[in-house]
Amino acid sequence: MSGIDDLPPLREVIKRHDLQARKSLGQNFLLDLNLTARIARAAGPLEGVTVVEIGPGPGGLTRALLATGAARVIAVERDERALGPLQEIAAHYPGRLEIVLGDAQTFDPRPMLDGGPARIVANLPYNIGTQLLIDWLCTEPWPPWYDMMVLMFQREVAERIVAVGDDEAYGRLGVLANWRAETKILFDISPAAFTPPPKVTSSVVRLKPRPNPDACERRLLEQVAGAAFNQRRKMLRQSLKPLGVDPEKLAAAAGIDGTRRAETVPVSGFVAMANALAELRKAAKTAT
């Protein structure tokens, strides 16, 4: 028995179902149920909440979410080997665990939601974690269908998510994440807690969607941040040239000195440049 329920220990479950982690699937199983319970508590209170979990594997975090009180867990797993362990958990928590065999990158949970609060809580596969986060941050309409995300990433990626300026980790991901959400690294998890142990420390990050982020067109914000950080060592008057407008005019219209570099510009500055880009392109189109 485990410390959170009377289901078998995860190592026994993995051995019985021949569920060794596969590198090709980005799998690193977190077997310490005290840590999975800590992650679940970081997303709480969970009473009345539907949780979407990506890549549950043998179900350590799944069990913690249900034991902590989640009303429902929608577990999205592409590895058929995990179905057996997950079905055992579903039998232990009747009516509260729904298992979806499929690819998280194409799965839309919204048809399965009942209108109540929903959260995304996951130990994300390292190989698709960043792209999944970007997809969730780009959800339309906004505010999104979830009210919180509690996600595990490599520490390096976590630092990029929460960075907001004058930081080597600051980049396009930080601009997008902090424009649309309040971000915070909650705690780190040692490689030794995983099977197999990854080569890097992991971090649990909480993102709370901002109900009213500064107004701008997301697509243009991504373009401006992408251009600026693709040549992050250059001044904006040089790095913004690929946008097809006069970069000096663009920076000036946003109230930003064109001699600044991308990492010195706050999220609000990128929003201002995205709005300035929209106006400059509109004016150029009108002129032709």
Image: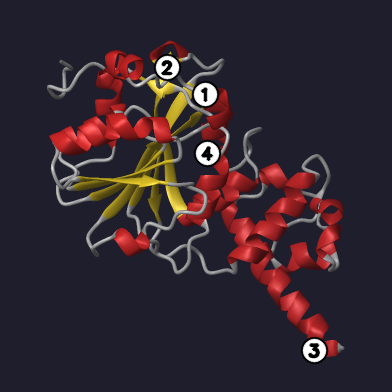
Q: Residues within 10 Å of mark 3 (few under 14, many from 20)?
A: few
Where does residue 280 sit, x and y in percent of width and height? 76, 76
* x and y percentages locating residue 55 in the rendered image: 41, 36
Residue drawn at x 87%, y 53% as measured from the top left:
238
Are discs 4 and 2 less than 8 Å apart at CB?
no
Decide if residue 10 is on the left or right side of residue 128: left
Report, in whole angstroms, how far the alpha carbon at label 2 lies from the one at label 3.
58 Å
Few, some or many residues within 10 Å of mark 1 (<14, 14–19, 20+): few
Quadrant (top left, top right, bottom left, bottom right) of the N terminus = top left
Marked residue nearer the N-terminal end (4 or 3): 4
> If you read the primary sequence from the N terminus, does the residue marked by circle 1 or circle 2 appear first?
1
- Identify residue for label 4: 129
Q: Which residue is mark 1?
A: 22
Marks 1 and 3 close (CB-CB < 8 Å): no
Classify residue 253 as left or right of residue 96: right
Q: State which tag comes first along the sequence, 2 or 3.
A: 2
Q: Is residue 213 left or right of residue 172?
A: left
Query: SS at mark 1?
Result: loop
What is the C-alpha distance between the residues marked 1 and 3?
55 Å
Q: Which residue is mark 3?
A: 286
Mark 4 and mark 2 lie on one chain; the one further toward the N terminus is 4
Mark 4 near mark 3, Cβ–Cβ under 8 Å? no
Query: Which residue occupies 44% across, 52% down?
Result: 181
* Residue type of the residue flagged with mark 2: Phe
The residue that disc 2 covers is 194
Between marks 4 and 3 in the image, the one whose residue lies nearer the viewer: 4
Task: Determine the secondary structure under disc 3.
Answer: helix
> What is the quadrant of residue 232 in the picture?
top right
- The reply to whether residue 163 is visible in this rendering is no
